[in-house]
Image (cartoon, rainbow, N blue to C red):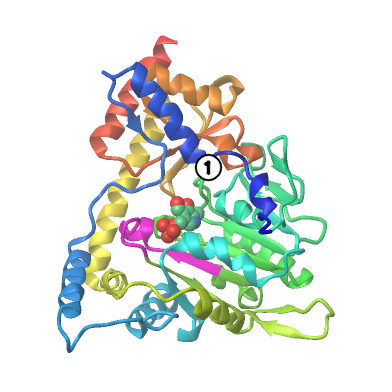
């Protein structure tokens, strides 16, 4: 008799965005004339950069020719891309990453979700709260999170990040084995300065813990003092894995490409305490069993963004989104909303008026002005009382959404 993995049954019924879509659809049915503007979901809207399109066309042509056709590629990714990553994303920051420490993937979601497989199921986990839901859900699926009760997982240590602590998570006073950090943060749009990141690295080194550092939004950092990589912190090579994505950096949500860094120094101990196991090798073993590499076309596309022209073109798109963020920040602040983020990240994290619960505000905004936000509580218990807006929309939609929100807020 095949038994189901019942840990899956502990997951809350609906994925957050499916729940939102259902409610938006119900609204559309009852209000067919209203043009709904979504500032909710984190997908991009601008087309790919011309250099990327050109590189993809060229790669497709190569595939059509017997002499240049490519089949399975190396599981860790092609050298041309890994060399570009090494040279452009790390060396200028004084970080040396070996080519064999770079694992090219099909986007950060797969690796941020799968990485926990190489550590024992009975490690305990900690997350900053609110947070991108994949980290907790993927651990829940293997039984590490306990049960979901009153909006919280019983076996997860939450590090609350709210306006009260200026969105700076407090270092735990007890042992946590696996810690997920995401900076710039989704959903709060906030960042951590070097001295705060240093505290986490020191904690991990002291406790033999592992940090999973998601840098998916590092391209949006504008403050020169804010680190783009955890490896800017001394000692991080011994305790941290870092994830990168081209999805928001270069509009690759539909192309699919990213990469993960696992330094060679990183190890974890066996349960009897007798052996330290190299996690780079373990992940390589996992990947060569379960993953056959990222498409050649996607990797050529990613390589193109590191050319001088490519860098310029993707920056233009990032600037476009950040101008959206500025427009939203300014409008909402003028309307007396308390707004966070949106300076070093494409997300705005906003307090609901009068402490209203976040789903209630979601409904009011939808029915009051046909604008979709993401209720903060969907990202964790400390997200209650907040909502998230993304700056990935079209400029006209952003302006129209702000106009409607202004009119609606002033009328209330
Ligand atoms: N990490 C964070 C924090 C994200 O917000 C997202 C996507 O929204 C991802 C990872 C996944 O990105 P990808 O498209 O590379 O899988």
133 and 399: which is toward the camera? 133
Please indicate whether residue 404 sits to the left or right of residue 233 in the image: left
Q: Position of residue 247 (x, y in %)?
A: 37, 58
On-image quarter of the C terminus: top left
95 and 97: which is toward the camera? 97
What residue lies at 47% left-to-right and 19% top-to-bottom? 364
195 and 381: which is toward the camera? 381
- Taking the magenta stretch, the answer to whether it contains residue 335 is no
Name the residue furthest top. 411
Query: How crowded is the residue under tag 1: few (<14 C-alpha within 10 Å), some, or many (20+)?
Result: few
Mark 1 CB lies closer than 8 A to ligand 1: no
Element type at mark 1: loop
Quarter residue 36 falls in: top left
144 and 333: which is toward the camera? 144
What residue lies at 27% left-to-right and 74% top-to-bottom? 300
Residue 333 visible, this angle: no
Residue 365 visible, this angle: yes
Q: Position of residue 200 (x, y in %)?
A: 68, 63
Residue at which label 1 appears: 15
Name the residue furthest front. 1
Please indicate whether residue 339 sits to the left or right of residue 247 in the image: right
Q: Which residues are magenta?
A: 242-256
């Amino acid at each position: 008799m095949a038994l189901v993995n019942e840990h899956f049954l502990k997951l809350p019924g609906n994925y957050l965005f499916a729940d939102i879509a259902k409610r938006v659809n119900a609204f559309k049915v009852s209000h067919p004339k209203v043009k709904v503007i979504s500032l909710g979901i984190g997908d991009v809207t601008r087309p790919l950069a011309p250099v990327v399109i050109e590189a993809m066309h060229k790669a497709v042509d190569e595939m059509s020719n017997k002499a240049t056709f490519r089949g399975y590629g190396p599981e860790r990714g092609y050298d041309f891309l890994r060399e570009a990553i090494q040279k452009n994303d790390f060396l200028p920051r004084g970080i040396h990453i070996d080519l064999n420490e770079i694992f090219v993937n099909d986007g950060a979601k797969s690796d941020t979700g799968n990485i926990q497989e190489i550590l024992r199921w009975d490690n305990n986990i900690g997350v900053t709260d609110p947070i991108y839901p994949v980290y907790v859900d993927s651990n829940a699926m293997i039984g590490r999170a306990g049960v979901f009760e009153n909006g919280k997982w019983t076996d997860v240590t939450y590090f609350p990040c709210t306006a009260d602590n200026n969105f700076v998570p407090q270092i735990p006073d007890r042992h946590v084995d696996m810690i997920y950090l995401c900076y710039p943060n989704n959903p709060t749009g906030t960042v951590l300065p070097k001295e705060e990141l240093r505290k986490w690295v020191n904690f991990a080194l002291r406790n033999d813990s592992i940090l999973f550092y998601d840098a998916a939004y590092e391209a949006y950092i504008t403050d020169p003092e804010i680190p783009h990589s955890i490896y800017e912190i001394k000692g991080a090579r011994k305790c941290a894995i870092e994830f990168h994505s081209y999805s928001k950096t270069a509009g690759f949500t539909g192309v699919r490409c990213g990469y993960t860094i696992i330094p060679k120094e990183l190890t974890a101990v066996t349960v009897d305490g007798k052996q330290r196991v190299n996690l780079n090798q373990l992940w390589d073993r996992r990947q060569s069993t379960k993953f056959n590499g990222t498409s050649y076309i996607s990797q050529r596309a990613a390589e193109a963004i590191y050319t001088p022209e490519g860098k310029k073109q993707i920056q233009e798109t990032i600037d476009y989104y950040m101008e959206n963020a500025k427009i939203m920040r300014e409008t909402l602040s003028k309307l007396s909303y308390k707004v966070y983020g949106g300076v070093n990240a494409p997300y705005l994290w906003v307090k609901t008026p009068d402490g209203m619960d976040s789903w209630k505000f979601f409904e009011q905004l939808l029915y009051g002005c046909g604008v979709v936000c993401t209720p903060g509580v969907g990202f964790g218990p400390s997200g209650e009382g907040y909502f998230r807006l993304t700056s990935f929309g079209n400029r006209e939609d952003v302006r129209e959404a702000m106009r409607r929100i202004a009119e609606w807020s002033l009328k209330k």
